[in-house]
């Protein structure tokens, strides 16, 4: 997605969405245009200086990018990049992507997700099933079964900050398309996911997502 199309998409969001994160909505386009026009480089403490939420994203073969929170809809957060489109998360879980060659178009949980943003996940004996839509190819309602394993305590560094977290690995499988993969999540005692590595389509490399400045509702 080029810069002009991205800013047009931001303008559409601004005109159609009433969001509690008004400051981010008003300034996201300006910051992307003036500070992140080349797509990636930023100092470790740069997110601390911004007045709104951000995430840093890495993918194999691509530079690290800073994404700005551009829209909030209930528990869903829409993160906007200068060069990649958008990522939509719910409590740190990636549920939709926009702007990639292959995209995760939709995620619907059949039963509850492991992550609700309020506490560390409870390990379940039954799979956490969800249905996803993928593009291209009009692939709808693909069932993903997953199980969660607690790996252990890990201290991680993001920018100039250190966080005490517990790592969880989620093993996922779809018999319909023969896709098996593992996501990893680093979660603090309050249930906030500070770092994750998440797959979103069978053909794309996973994304490593770091929460560089978390969203605080006003």
Image (tube, rainbow, N blue to C red):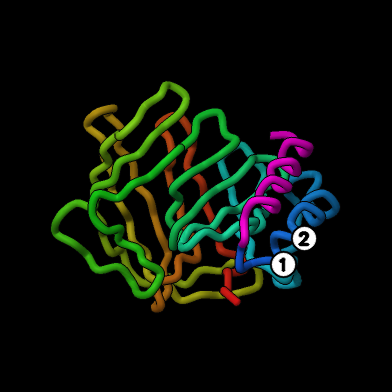
- Label 2, secondary structure: give it: helix
Which stretch is magenta? 1-18
Nearest to the observer: residue 86 or residue 39: 86
Quadrant of residue 84 within the rendered picture: top right
Q: Residue furthest top?
A: 137
Q: Are marks 1 and 2 in contact (CB under 8 Å)?
A: yes
Q: Is residue 3 above or below residue 72?
A: above
Quadrant showing the N terminus: top right
The residue indicated by pointer 2 is 27
- Label 1, secondary structure: give it: helix
Q: Position of residue 62 (x, y in %)?
A: 64, 39
Magenta residue check for 12: yes
Gap in Å between the C-alphas at discs 1 and 2?
6 Å
The residue indicated by pointer 1 is 23
Which residue occupies 52% across, 50% down?
88
Image position of 203 (left or right of 140): right
Quadrant of residue 166 within the rendered picture: bottom left
Disc number for residue 48: none
């Amino acid at each position: 997605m080029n810069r002009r199309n991205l800013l047009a998409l931001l303008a559409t969001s601004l005109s159609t969405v009433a969001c509690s994160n008004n400051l981010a909505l008003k300034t996201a386009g300006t910051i992307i245009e003036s500070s992140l026009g080349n797509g990636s480089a930023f100092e470790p403490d740069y997110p601390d200086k911004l007045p709104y939420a951000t995430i840093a994203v890495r993918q194999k073969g691509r530079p690290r990018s800073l994404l700005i929170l551009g829209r909030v809809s209930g528990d869903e957060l829409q993160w906007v990049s200068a060069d990649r489109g958008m990522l939509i998360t719910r409590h740190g879980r990636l549920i939709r992507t926009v702007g990639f060659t292959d995209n995760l178009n939709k995620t619907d949980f059949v039963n509850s997700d492991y992550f609700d943003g309020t506490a560390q996940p409870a390990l379940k004996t039954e799979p956490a099933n969800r249905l996803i839509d993928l593009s291209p190819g009009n692939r709808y309602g693909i069932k993903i079964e997953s199980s969660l394993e607690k790996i252990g305590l890990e201290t991680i560094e993001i920018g100039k900050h250190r966080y005490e977290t517990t790592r969880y690995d989620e093993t996922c499988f779809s018999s319909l398309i023969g896709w098996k993969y593992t996501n990893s999540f680093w979660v603090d005692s309050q249930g906030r996911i500070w770092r994750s590595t998440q797959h979103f389509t069978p053909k794309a490399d996973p994304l490593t997502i770091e929460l560089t400045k978390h969203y605080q509702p006003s």
